[in-house]
Amino acid sequence: MNAARARTSHRVAVIGGDGIGPEVTAEALKVVRASGVELDTTFFDLGGARYLRDGEVLSDDTLEVLRGFDAILLGAVGTPGVPPGVIERGLLLKLRFSLDLYINQRPFVGTGPGHTRSHDFVVIRENTEGPYVGEGGVLRKGTQHEVATQGSVNTRFGVERCIRYAFELASSRERKHVTLVHKTNVLTFAGDLWQRTFDAVAAQFPGVGTAYNHVDAACIYFVQDPHRYDVIVTDNRFGDILTDLGGAVSGGIGLASSANLNPARTGPSLFEPVHGSAPDIAGKGVANPVAAILSAALMLDHLGESRAAQAIREACSQPTNGSTVAVGDEICRRLHG
Ligand code: IPM
Ligand code: MN
């Protein structure tokens, strides 16, 4: 090999999915290529539409194939007509759990008047435990005596590795601050485990400041004073809800990106916008591709292509208008300009 800087092509599995998923994913791939990073892509036809066609959600064989990639880029999944949970549990959560994607990292930047930054924080959502584990069941279904239980699993191991990741991330950021968000006053068993683990990890990071907010209060602060936050760490369910709100107060859900990370790198990590498949606007060419593009930038960070990732974020930092394809084109133009 003669080149001093040999370009490696990253092997990326692409799951466009349903609704607007394939449209926004195509723009994300276009922008990554315009940034100069080479991707070797393999497309996987998975999601609600595939399930309705032949019953496949995510076979163990396909999962094993996906394990061999450097990263997975996902658009959005979900189609009307598929019962709730089939695709969510069978595809998304199966990927998160099987690939041990225990961190769900969701950054939020808000711009005020004149494009000044009103806030810049990251939610670290635990991604493999909590109520998402699916512990529980139903008795006497459909009768007057029906009973449904839905547990929440919180392990010291799972909570600690998530909190540690949040502190490590905060150490690398300017403000060096972590807020734990929970509901320790009511969910006393899980809350106590989270709080004690948080305190124990915090003691190992003396240079990082800390705070605690109940989740309901955090909702007010997200709207009224989001600037107070740097890194937030929270459980799977609170993180799900808070990050939709984070999107809403940071320019809209069409800008919200996420990384499902396996920081131990025992397999690929998965990158996807926070938004869903939006079947009502699918195929109209009006979906905002920026969330998918910023998710691809998070993928580039993980693949060691931070310069390209940063360039993409800068290109996305000014507002863009127009169709899905026009927004993608404009961001490519800014990368070249
Ligand atoms: C998200 C989504 C998923 C979640 C659903 C689709 C399983 O809402 O990524 O936030 O709840 O995690
Ligand atoms: Mn969600």
Image (spheres, helix red, strand yellow):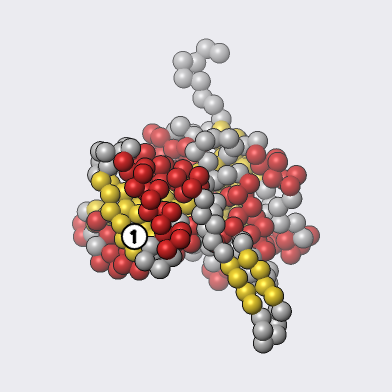
Q: Residue 153 at x, y = what percent? A: 54, 57
Q: Quadrant of the C terminus?
A: top left
Q: Residue at x 34, y 47 (%)?
A: 199
Q: Residue furthest right?
A: 54
Amino acid type, callout 1:
Ser
Q: Residue 303 at x, y = what percent? A: 49, 34
Q: Residue 49 at x, y = what percent? A: 69, 62
Q: Which residue position is annotated with label 1?
A: 250
Q: Residue at x 24, y 53 (%)?
A: 117
Left or right: 161 with respect to 221?
Answer: right
Left or right: 119 with respect to 283?
Answer: left
Residue 47's place in the image compared with 309, above or below, is below
Q: Is residue 10 visible?
A: yes
Within 10 Å of disc 1 (Cα), the crowding (few <14, some 14-19, many 20+) is many
Q: Is residue 283 visible?
A: no
Left or right: 75 with respect to 225?
Answer: right
Taking depth in this image into account, of 215 and 324 the one nearest to the observer is: 215
Q: Quadrant of the N terminus?
A: top right
Residue 175 sits in which quadrant?
Answer: top left
Question: Which SS class for mark 1?
Answer: loop
Q: Could you tell me how many numbered marks the image carries?
A: 1
Residue 143 sits in which quadrant?
Answer: bottom right
Taking depth in this image into account, of 153 and 264 the one nearest to the observer is: 153
Q: Residue furthest bottom?
A: 144
Q: Residue at x 74, y 64 (%)?
A: 52
